[in-house]
Amino acid sequence: MNTTIMLFLVQDGITNGAIYALLGLALVLVFAVTRVILIPQGEFVTYGALTYASLAAGQMPGTAKLALALGIGAFAFDLFVARKALHGRLILRSAVTNIVLPAIVLALTVYFAGQKPPVAVSIALSLVIVAMIGLYLYRVAFQPLAHTSVLVLLIASVGVHLALQGLGLLFFGAEGQRGPAVLSGAFTAGALRFTGQSLTVYGITIAFIVGLWLFFGLTLYGKALRATAVNRLGARLVGIRTTLSGQIAFLLASVIGALSGIMIVPITTLYYDSGFLIGLKGFVAAIIGGLVSYPLTAVAALVVGLVEAFSSFYASNYKEVIVFMLLIPVLLLRSLAAPAVEEEKD
Amino acid sequence: MSALLSVTDAHVAYGKVEAVRSVSLEVGANQIVTIVGANGAGKTTLLSAIMGILPLKGRVTFAGQDLARLDIEDRVAMGLGLVPEHRELFVTMNVEDNLELGAFRIERSKAKASMERVYTLFPRLKERRKQLAGTLSGGEQQMLAMGRALMGEPKLLMLDEPSLGLAPIIVADIFRIVTELRASGVSVLLVEQNAQAALKIADQAYVMELGEFVLSGKASDIAANERVAASYLGFQHEGDSAI
């Protein structure tokens, strides 16, 4: 192999690694705050990507309707939980966030879908739609189970993943789609060619990581999220609602997923079920980070991206196997280093 | 005058085991009330249930409002604070962040002044404000736990074994601060194994044994009670089987 090929592979690996890093960070965040292992993270990726691609192609994405349907479900859950102490303000607030908001977005989507909107509008709509799906999913599928064990939450998570994947097939069909580049054009530096799209990936990933770092380090809500992750009871005792933290975590995770999808879909053709494998690679990074460490997860994600790039060059048939095999030594080392801990009960 | 906190006929159970049986108590405004009793008498269980961490059968009112339908977070917002036995600090965050989060339900503009007040009460916390909570000594962690609860501007602060495992000089400091809290208008419900120290600063006292209150009254009367003296204040009587 010559240097040019190696540089290409490194570039490719870093581009993919950056996406895995974002997804891994979202997984760590959601797990730390809610104890949910977010298998549907990959569906957020495909939903974001394919919603964007559909809009750009002038088609109406079914996800906007799904957001409204889930919102109605979330509204019903809110009413049921508060049935003994219903008052007007609560009903109004729940109706606005769960029904009026997705209805407006649906109307906008219908309006724009017919006329091939500009890229920025497609991106914004896709992000908002997937963000709402994430938020309502938490309300419908995970919030009622918040007090149960990690295993129950994992089973719910698998269920949500399967349901979303099936709906993905319904909404987008079995054919793959590609979307327009966010930033077109390219330039060359020596042997390397940087496309606008790969620069977008680097830029957005770095911006998001810095943004998350500022959010967690400086803002009250960011700190509240960390506090919930560190000590759930302690957080409740200062008045931080576990459900609020869960909502913020899911909102961030779904936005991160959708954004990743929008960044990938101009580079690779995505199918309704592509997200799972992409999410799984973020998961590998998150596991290497022990589901707690953000920096370790980000570094591990870059390693996953690089290993994937090089193994697809040397042994493309085995590239997935090689990537997932990374887990085995890590899990072995971790299990040797830390004795089995009983699951936290609360 | 109606009591700030009033508990009537409270039962708390872990599954089928009733850890607290038919307990009633009142805490008035500007009062220190203490519950003394041996390890396992049900004191911590009672505090947890008043806070809403454990389900309670019976009636609890705070500032005139029934707490039955309110969860922990609502009770915090109403001005009920708990410093639990295990402190439940955010150990990987620094002292200042812990305090800032204590004021999560308070207007941001008031939080600054609150923090200054806490630093005045606990100057040690100000020295350590950039240090991670998990690296503080036991006494400092207790101060931080109290400080964090005070940031929420509670009307009633419930303290669960604040002196447990601390050096005597720090214990004295903490008890001094509890009396200062009363002077500044915060009521305190204090659960303690160190009955002697607790009864010295309290106005009212309850003695708890095996999940029930066996004695209640003015703290000074309780301290003078022979049986209490024998069981909890360290005067040994042979054959006493109260605990």
Image (cartoon, rainbow, N blue to C red):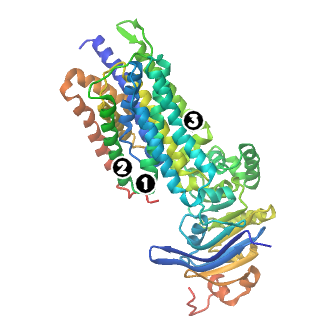
Front-lying residue, A245 or A269: A269
Q: Which residue is mark 1?
A: A145
Q: Residue at x 45, y 46 (%)?
A: A73
Are dots 3 and 1 in contact, CB under 8 Å? no
Amino acid type shown at disc 1: Leu
Residue B197 appears anywhere in the view: no
**Could you tell me which secondary element the residue under label 2 belongs to?**
helix
Task: Please tell me if label 1 and label 2 are on a single chain.
Answer: yes
**Could you tell me which secondary element the residue under label 3 belongs to?**
helix
Left or right: residue B63 versus residue A33 is right
Find residue A156 and name its label: 2
Amino acid type shown at disc 2: Ala
Q: Residue at x 63, y 62 (%)?
A: B82
Q: Chain of mark 1?
A: A
Are dots 1 and 2 in contact, CB under 8 Å? yes
Q: Which residue is mark 3?
A: A215
Toward which corner of the image does residue B188 lie, by quadrant? bottom right
